[in-house]
Every structure is written in structure tokens, then in C-alpha cells.
Image (spheres, rainbow, N blue to C red):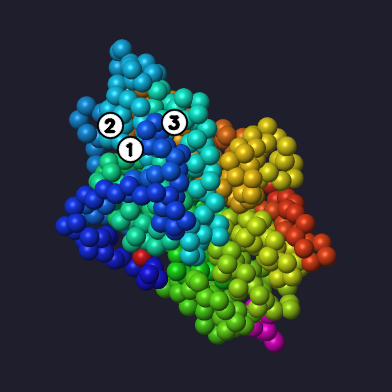
Amino acid sequence: MNRPRPATESALGTLALVVGVGVVLSVVTIVPSGNTQLVAGGPGTGNNTVTQNNGNPNAPVTNNNVPGAKPGSHPGVQNPVPGSNNSGNGTLPPSKAGLSCDSQHNGGSTDRGISASNIHMAATTVTDGPGASFLAASNGAISAVAAQVNKAGGICGRHLTIDMRNDSWKRDLGAQYIQNFVQGEHIFGLAVNPDSEGLYEVASTGYIDKQQVPVVGSGGQTGVEYTDPWIWPVGTATISQMHIMAKDAYARGARHFAIAFESQYRFGLEGAYAFEKAVERLTGAKIPGFDPKLESCNSGSRFCGVPSGQTSYTSQATQFNNACFGVQSNGSNCDFVAYLMEPDTALAFLSNRGQASPLYGMAGAEPLFNRQAFANKCQDACNVQVGFNVWTGYQPPEGAYSGQAAESKYVTDMRNSNGGIDVDNQFVEGAYIGMNLLVKALQTVGPELTRFRLQTALDAMTFDSGLTKTLRWSPGHHFANDAAMGWRLNYSNGSFSGFSAATKFETDPWLGQDNLKTNG
């Protein structure tokens, strides 16, 4: 996979390679494979098979990334099809006369992917390679909620079928799978879609808008999820988390900032850029060594972008530590360091951390809020007196939140489905919240289930899961979650001993700003 850069490129050109193969249907038995995942199916699907389709990946797309567009706007979006119920005023009309919530009277095939007995959804996921350490377990949350709904009889007589396909966090492959889902398998929409890379590709090139694909409950790792009128994130944007992280450190006294980030994935590029712009506003100066290409980690730089998947980062980490803590005169050491990495990369990079510690601590974004993959393994590298905080837009089942009704239900639901799942993994919690948003939205729409009625319902929805602040979406504004809070990693005798709250929820003071708009 080529490392993404913030420069405009051809939208889905690589997908043309599979033109001409037609629609190929194959039913495969679930085996321990990285490319197929067992999901909760509807009636007649069985629990040990999944259908994989290869659709037409050569459909034209439009690029709606208009430079300078206001946050929340999306120029160039197609108008709803004639006769749709999307009135644009946030009011959901009642279902047609004679319809009711049972399989005999729900209207049958009201839209693509919908039958009298089934709602066909899909998701691209990440179960191997970089990213799997924090994204793979999201599948368990998606399946658990779907199975729970189906066991209770479904939604207006329809069961949820959610096809999941692992793309190893490869942008082009994820985009191809999504296009296959939409044009080959004719799904209704995407549920949560843990793979942020494939989702970024199809959203930033206009494909989601052109095909009018509802994407409900995404994690918000990329900024385009908040400006696309067909995507409803439940997570706090990476750019918002980095804004909040910088603002919090500055308020505590930090003035000399540094960041190490993954330059191969969009969340790293966007988050690093947003962090630098926040620091620039707060201090009046750029982070030393800032690279506008967002890709280098040069000697003397406190802005350090590294590729993913390396077994060792000794060279880059040594240079970074020397830039931060090797100041001899006429300067100051770093007093706050942010790490915007997935767990495996962060652990490899931090294993080379210098002896000095920044005065106002270190911090990681949501991918590092993970007990099993990060906190348990970080040990000495994170066990520093000044503290290592991890940030999240959700309320984890820790501290004052532990034992609350919504938290207890979340933990119980997850452990009943998979006793070994890490309920502190914030992408598991986010997937659980996202699926519950999908269920509520489908229930709100009722028997006459169409994409435009779902869009109208979501754009007028207030959603209180008990696991986040109350979330509200409206047309042109999908930044429903604009807050995050920090939690400290605690260690005792060299072992992780738990999370403790370091801050309350803090809101993004520059919501929607610093969003890289190019398809890089």
C-alpha cells in the first residue's frame, strides 16, 4: 500500500483493475481466514456461511471535496430521487397507510437491500495487519448487537444481516469491497464500518453521496465522516481529540510541544496536522520541524511522522528524543509529547523512549485507550511520574462510570457474546454505540424503510446511549460528538493497575477546523 499524502489523487482508479469480471457469487464456509468474518445473519442465512459478491467497481464517482467549504457543508450532493420522503426539514412523514411492524405488512422490498424479512447491511473491517490490535474486536460488538436484535424478532419483522469483510486497513481494497457491497450485493447501508481507510476513500471521492449509502455509527477517525451528509459518526473526530489534547496541556502550563505520529494512515495525517495548528494558535509558533508534507522525522524535528508496521523505530525515536530532550542552551526541552499511533507502532516507538520525561506529561489518542493491546504492554515506557494519559470521546466502564446502568449493560452484552473481549477498548465501545444508533434509527423509521427516510430520521435524532454525551445530528452538522476526556494509565510494581480519570469532558474549541480536505 502506498503511503497516503495530503495531495489530490485519482479517486478510485485502482478499482478499474477488476472491471469485466461481472458479478461473481460464492458462498464460503467460515474458516479461520483474515478475509471473512462470521456475522449475525437474518432468517435463512445460517450462522456458518457468508455470501461474498464482487460488484462493478468501475462506476463513475464525483469529487465533492470543494476547498474552502464550511465545516458541515457538502457542495455537490445529489438531490433525493423523485418521490422520496426526504423533505429536508428534519420531519419524518408517517409510513404509508396500511403498513405495520410485521413481516406481512411492512411493505416488503421498500428499497435496495430490504425485503419483508431482512435488512442487508455490510461493513469493511480490520482483522489482520496494522490496525487490527485496536480495530479487530469491533466485529464482536457489531455482531453482538445484531444478534440481540434478531433474537428479539428484528425490526418491524425484518432481521439484520451484516456482511463483514476484512481489508487489512488497505484503502484501495476497502474501497473496492464497499463498492462491491453497494453495486454488486445491493446492500442497504454500512453499519459502523471499522475500516476508516476504505471509508475515507469512498467518502472523499464522492462515491457515498452518488450512491446514497447510509453509513451509521462510524468511529470518526477521518474528518470527511463529519462533512458527508450520508455518514453519522458517534465518535469524537481525531482532529477534535488532538485539538482538545493540545488545549488541555497548554492550560496546565505546557509551552513546548512535540508529536510522533503514523504517516501511513489518514487518522495520523489529519490528527498531526490538527495538533500542529492548535499548538500554533496557542503558542504563536509552529512545532519545530513541522513538515507540511506530514511525512518526515528528520534530525532536530519535534514533528515526527513514521511509517507503520516496522519492528524497530530506534533511529526515528532516538532523533525525536534528542530533539525533545537534548537541548543544551538557548532553548527548552519538550514539556508535552503526543503520540498518534496504533498500539503496535506506539509500543515499538516508545520502547526507545529517552530517560527524560516531559514536564506536563505524555498523551495518546483513542487507539491507545486499550487495556489488552496497549496499557498492559506499555509498562515502563508509560509508567512515568508525570503521567501518560489516553483520550476518548466515550465514557469507559471505569472510575465513576463503572457500574452505571448503561455501562453495566454494555459490559454484560459484550462479555455474554465474548468473555475475553476488552471492554476498555474504545473502538469496541464505539462500535457498540454505533450499532445501537443504527437500531434506534431503523426503529424510528418504521416499516416503510428507505434510505431517505433513514437520512431524515437521523438528521433529526437526539441519541442518549448513556455512554457518551447526548448526541444530536442535523442536516449539514454531523459533529454530534465534540468532546473528549483524558484517563491516566496507572502502574504498580511494573504492571498496569487500571485507568483513573484525569479530566472531565472537554469540548473542541475549533470544531471542524483544520480538516485536511484533499484526497491524499
Q: Nearer the viewer, residue 29 or 351?
A: 29
Q: Secondary structure at mark 2?
A: loop
Which mark is drawn over residue 12? Answer: none
Which mark is drawn over residue 188? Answer: 1
User: In this rendering, which labeled residue sits more in front, label 3 or label 2?
Assistant: 2
Identity, as a three-letter code, of the amino acid under mark 2: Asp
Label 2: which residue?
111
**Which corner quadrant of the image does residue 335 belong to?**
bottom right
Identity, as a three-letter code, of the amino acid under mark 1: Phe
Label 3: which residue?
441
- Going by the picture, which residue comes out furthest to the left? 20
Crowdedness near tag 2: few (<14), some (14–19) or many (≥20) residues, C-alpha within 10 Å: some
Q: Nearer the viewer, residue 125 or 49?
A: 49
Residue 392 percent location from the top left of the image: 61, 51
Q: Give the left or right position of residue 67, taking residue 291 as reference.
A: left
Q: Residue at x 45, y 74 (%)?
A: 295
Position of the C terminus, as image quadrant, is: bottom left
Looking at the rendering, the stretch of residues picked out in magenta corresponds to 322-330
In the rendered view, tell whether residue 15 sits above or below residue 185.
below
Residue 518 percent location from the top left of the image: 35, 61
Q: Residue at x 47, y 56 (%)?
A: 32
- Res 243 seen here: no
Crowdedness near tag 3: few (<14), some (14–19) or many (≥20) residues, C-alpha within 10 Å: many
User: In this rendering, which labeled residue sits more in front, label 1 or label 3?
Assistant: 1
- Going by the picture, which residue comes out furthest to the bottom? 328
Residue 494 percent location from the top left of the image: 79, 66
Position of the N terminus, as image quadrant, is: bottom left
- Res 42 seen here: yes
Q: Which of marks 3 and 1 precedes in the sequence?
A: 1
